[in-house]
Amino acid sequence: MHKLLTIAACIAFLCSCNSSKQSSGNNGLTSQEKNEGWQLLFDGKSTKGWHTYGGEPVGFAWKVKEDLLYLDTSIKENWQIKGGGDIVTDEEYGNFELQLEWKIAKDGNSGIILYVHEDKKKYNWPWETGMEMQILDNNGHPDAKILKHRAGDLYDLIACSKETVKSHGEWNSVSIKSINGKLDFYLNGENVISTILWDDNWKKLVAGSKFKTMPAFGTFKKGRIGLQDHGNEVCFRNIKIRKL
């Protein structure tokens, strides 16, 4: 019965994703955006530009349908998904502005990981080097009870200055800007995180977090963008970036 309920919940979530406005306006760039240097990280048709962390092609559980990139969680494998895993961009970025929209399932968890240094021989997971903007159902996932683990937080480091996240099943708009060490998170149009990377205060933040035992965490000034497989259904669209 539990398996049937899980499958039913997955189908309902995907129907919710696919019921959104399709091709018109999604996963494209205006002439002005092109002139400003924006590039699509998701074309709405394929996983071109991405690979599984460690170098393998994107797995079969990361699917593209009707202008959406989503994680199909129908086959669990430990705490992640068979054929899923964390995916990262083919290209690395230093100063950048990233924009995207995400939608999480009920009780779901995922994340956007920045400055990932991809070296599987040294680091098994992208979050051993890269910092994360949390994606979460704040009304259902247990992490929501933990300070600095809620949606929009700089995970385990800084809590949002205000809560602007929408409920599970609704689209959230994200903008992340990183310019010469100044990092800003915007969630649904509001600046919810502003901090400086790599200075003494940053080192203190890391030392007081769960990442204190990971010496390379948050130290790289150029790296890949990652999307996390945390074992829950998640949808993305309108993923674009420009170098600054």
Image (cartoon, grey):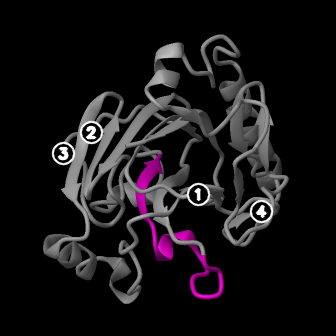
Q: Secondary structure at mark 4?
A: strand
Give the left or right position of residue 59, taking residue 217 as reference: right
Sequence-wise, the earlier of marks 3 and 4 is: 4
As drawn, the label of residue 228 is 1
Residue type, mark 4 in image: Lys
Q: Secondary structure at mark 2?
A: loop
Q: Position of residue 62 (x, y in %)?
A: 76, 49
Query: Which residue is tagged 3?
Result: 161
Residue type, mark 1 in image: Gln
Query: Which residue is tagged 4?
Result: 76
Measure how far apart labels 4 and 1 are at the Cα level. 15 Å
**3 vs 2, front mark:** 3
Measure how far apart labels 3 and 2 are at the Cα level. 7 Å
From this view, report whether residue 206 is shown above or below residue 112.
below
Query: Which residue is tagged 2?
Result: 163
Q: Secondary structure at mark 3?
A: loop
Say if the magenta span includes residue 38.
no
The quadrant holding residue 118 is bottom right
Q: Check if mark 3's residue and mark 4's residue have beta carbons within 8 Å.
A: no
